[in-house]
Image (tube, grey):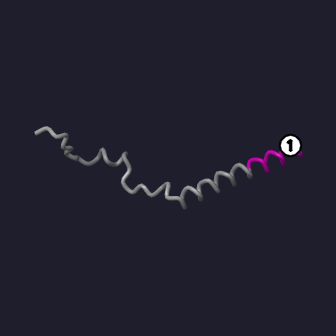
Amino acid sequence: MSVIILLLSVSLLVALGFLIAFIWSVKNGQFEDSFSPAHRILFDEKKDNGKE
């Protein structure tokens, strides 16, 4: 029974660590990308490479 309590406490500590890392990354602007590269492929953009 003590092993289950140990495993639960360790898993809660790990989950709390991931939650803190997520909140920290949100506050630092990690998820501020409003126009990601995955969406850029949907729009047709003409690039000028210096050739006509």
Type of the residue with mark 1 = Val
Residue 8 magenta? yes
In screen coordinates, is 49 left or right of 41?
left
Furthest residue in direction right, as rendered = 2
Residue 7, given in percent of the width and then of the height, sits at 80, 45
Q: Residue at x 55, y 55 (%)?
A: 25
Q: How many marks?
A: 1
Q: Residue at x 22, y 47 (%)?
A: 45
Q: Quadrant of residue 24?
A: bottom right
Q: Which residues are magenta?
A: 2-11
Furthest residue in direction left, as rendered = 52
Residue 52, given in percent of the width and then of the height, sits at 10, 39
In screen coordinates, is 12 left or right of 48?
right
Q: Nearer the viewer, residue 8 or 47?
A: 47
Q: Quadrant of the N terminus?
A: top right
Furthest residue in direction top, as rendered = 51
Number of residues whose C-alpha sits closer than 10 Å to that of mark 1, classed few (under 14), some (14–19) or many (20 or more): few
Q: Please, what secondary structure does the residue beneath circle 1 have?
A: helix
In screen coordinates, is 45 left or right of 38?
left
Q: Residue at x 54, y 61 (%)?
A: 27
Instruction: Quickly name the residue at label 1.
Output: 3
Residue 50, given in percent of the width and then of the height, sits at 16, 40
